[in-house]
Image (cartoon, rainbow, N blue to C red):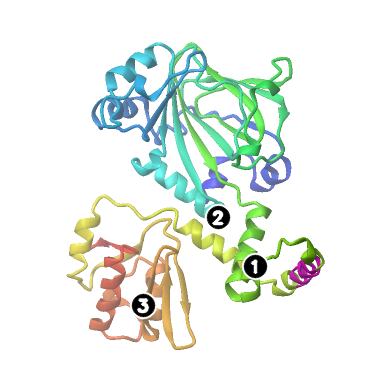
């Protein structure tokens, strides 16, 4: 399943890339109002505020009309005071639930799925806004966002002013003075089940209509050419000692700096290990999410006992790279960690990660049962796979 393809339907990926990506916003309407109801709900968020013992990093409270400080809704030791939060919400404040994908499985699957599909980091913030209220004033973001309207609706405005592809640095900070209320180029209602894509740097504002609004903001962190070249240079610096040498700032050495710069440019072109740079980024993306399951402790205990009727499957969206080195070792890497097996384990590992639903006692992998159990037990203990069935 391609999560991103499902997210932007009925737009195709090609149409999205050519017409909208990093260019302009698009409002994707849906006839299915309940399309995203599985992600989160007002009732679940209400319960979180009231009984889950949230802290200041977990939520933020904002109001476009009044400044809200943390002291207005905290209790002690950064614990959130649910009664104060409820009072602010009743007075028109928006509650933002930060990085909720770490608490709710549907949101985690969405983020890890989008991360895998795009090879870019994705995370969610949840916005709960009372009727006829606005959380943030007009602004732009330094990352792309997909606004997923889960409940209620919001009135949106898109402005002419924009900063082309800003980065998350102080010199790209939004300036309030650039807002011109007359320069609205699009105005619409985001209904339940709709999606809105807003590229970074596009100025926008939103306010809830006469009903409370719940939307998920899926933020996508860009991997820019700037990031690519920084990674590229870092790889060269790891391999070539002269890239780690000092640059003289003395006036008498300016000519040698210029010639050294020209020499380094030629080295850049000669290095050209593009795949290494890409793999470096992909590896960092894979480390961004860890597998989660409700019975992880039990799985680790069950790894001690394996039956020939068990079926072993890899965790969903835990991207695995399997390679064989020159010394006849099999390297299983999840980005965050690497496990090394003897070369004879390659067929066993391939059978598991091909998701063939085959009972492990029926594997045609050219190794004996005891050796197979050793391989599978190691994968289970490292939480790269899990046991699905024993009959």
Q: Is the residue under label 2 in contact with that under label 3 (CB below 8 Å)?
A: no
Nearer-N-terminus badge (1/3): 1
Q: Residues within 10 Å of mark 1 (few under 14, many from 20)?
A: few
Q: Residues within 10 Å of mark 3 (few under 14, many from 20)?
A: many
Which residue is labeled 3 in the image? Answer: 348
Helix, strand or loop at mark 1: loop
Report, in whole angstroms, how far the alpha carbon at label 1 lies from the one at label 2.
35 Å
Helix, strand or loop at mark 2: loop
**Residue at image coords 48%, 83%:** 325
- Where residue 188 appears, x then y in whole percent? 63, 20
Can you tell which mark lies on residue 388? none
Nearer-N-terminus badge (3/2): 2
Q: Pick the residue in front: 154 or 88.
A: 88
Report, in whole angstroms, how far the alpha carbon at label 1 lies from the one at label 3.
50 Å
Relative placement, left or right, of 334 versus 74 is: right
- Where residue 376 appears, x then y in whole percent? 29, 73
- Where residue 92 appears, x then y in whole percent? 44, 13
- Residue furthest out toward the bottom: 327
Q: Which residues are magenta?
A: 256-266
Q: Is residue 299 above or below residue 189?
A: below
Instruction: Say whether residue 391 is visible.
Output: no
Q: Nearer the viewer, mark 1 or mark 2?
A: 1
Q: Pick the residue in front: 68 or 143.
A: 68
User: In the picture, residue 329 is in which quadrant?
Assistant: bottom left
Q: Nearer the viewer, mark 3 or mark 2?
A: 2
Which residue is labeled 2 in the image? Answer: 119
**Residue at image coords 80%, 68%:** 262
Instruction: Say whether residue 218 is visible.
Output: yes
Can you tell which mark lies on residue 246? 1
User: In the picture, residue 100 is in which quadrant?
Assistant: top left
Quadrant (top left/top right/bottom left/bottom right) for the C terminus: bottom left
Q: Is residue 258 magenta?
A: yes
């Amino acid at each position: 399943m391609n999560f991103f393809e499902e997210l932007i339907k009925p737009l195709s990926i090609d149409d999205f890339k050519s017409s909208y990506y990093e260019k302009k916003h698009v409002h994707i309407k849906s006839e299915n109002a309940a399309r995203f109801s599985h992600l989160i709900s007002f009732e679940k968020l209400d319960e979180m505020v009231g009984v889950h013992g949230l802290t200041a990093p977990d939520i933020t409270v904002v109001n476009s009309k009044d400044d809200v400080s943390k002291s207005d809704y905290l209790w002690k030791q950064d614990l959130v005071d649910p009664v104060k939060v409820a009072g602010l919400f009743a007075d028109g404040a928006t509650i933002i639930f930060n990085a909720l994908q770490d608490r709710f499985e549907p949101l985690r699957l969405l983020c890890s799925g989008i991360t895998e599909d795009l090879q870019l980091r994705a995370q969610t913030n949840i916005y709960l806004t009372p009727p006829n209220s606005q959380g943030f004033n007009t602004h732009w973001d330094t990352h792309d966002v997909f606004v997923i309207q889960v409940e209620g609706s919001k009135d949106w405005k898109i402005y002419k002013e924009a900063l082309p592809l800003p980065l998350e640095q102080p010199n790209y900070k939004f300036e309030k003075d650039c807002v011109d209320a007359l320069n609205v180029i699009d105005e619409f209602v985001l209904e339940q089940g709709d999606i809105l894509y807003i590229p970074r740097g596009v100025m926008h504002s939103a306010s809830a209509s006469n009903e409370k609004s719940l939307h998920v903001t899926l933020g996508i962190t860009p991997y820019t050419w700037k990031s690519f070249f920084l990674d590229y240079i870092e790889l060269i610096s790891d391999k070539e000692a002269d890239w780690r040498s000092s640059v003289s700032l003395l006036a008498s050495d300016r000519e040698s700096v210029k010639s050294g710069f020209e020499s380094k440019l030629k080295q850049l072109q000669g290095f050209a290990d593009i795949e290494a740079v890409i793999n470096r980024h992909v590896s960092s993306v894979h480390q961004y999410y860890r597998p989660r399951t409700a019975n992880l402790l039990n799985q680790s205990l069950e790894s001690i006992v394996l039956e020939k009727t068990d079926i072993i499957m890899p965790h969903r969206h835990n991207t695995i790279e399997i390679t064989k080195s020159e010394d006849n070792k099999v390297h299983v890497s999840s980005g965050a960690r690497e496990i090394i097996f003897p070369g004879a384990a390659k067929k066993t590992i391939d059978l598991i990660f091909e998701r063939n639903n085959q009972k492990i006692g029926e594997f045609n992998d050219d190794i004996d049962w005891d050796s197979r159990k050793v391989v599978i037990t190691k994968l289970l203990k490292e939480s790269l796979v899990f046991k699905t069935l024993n009959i």
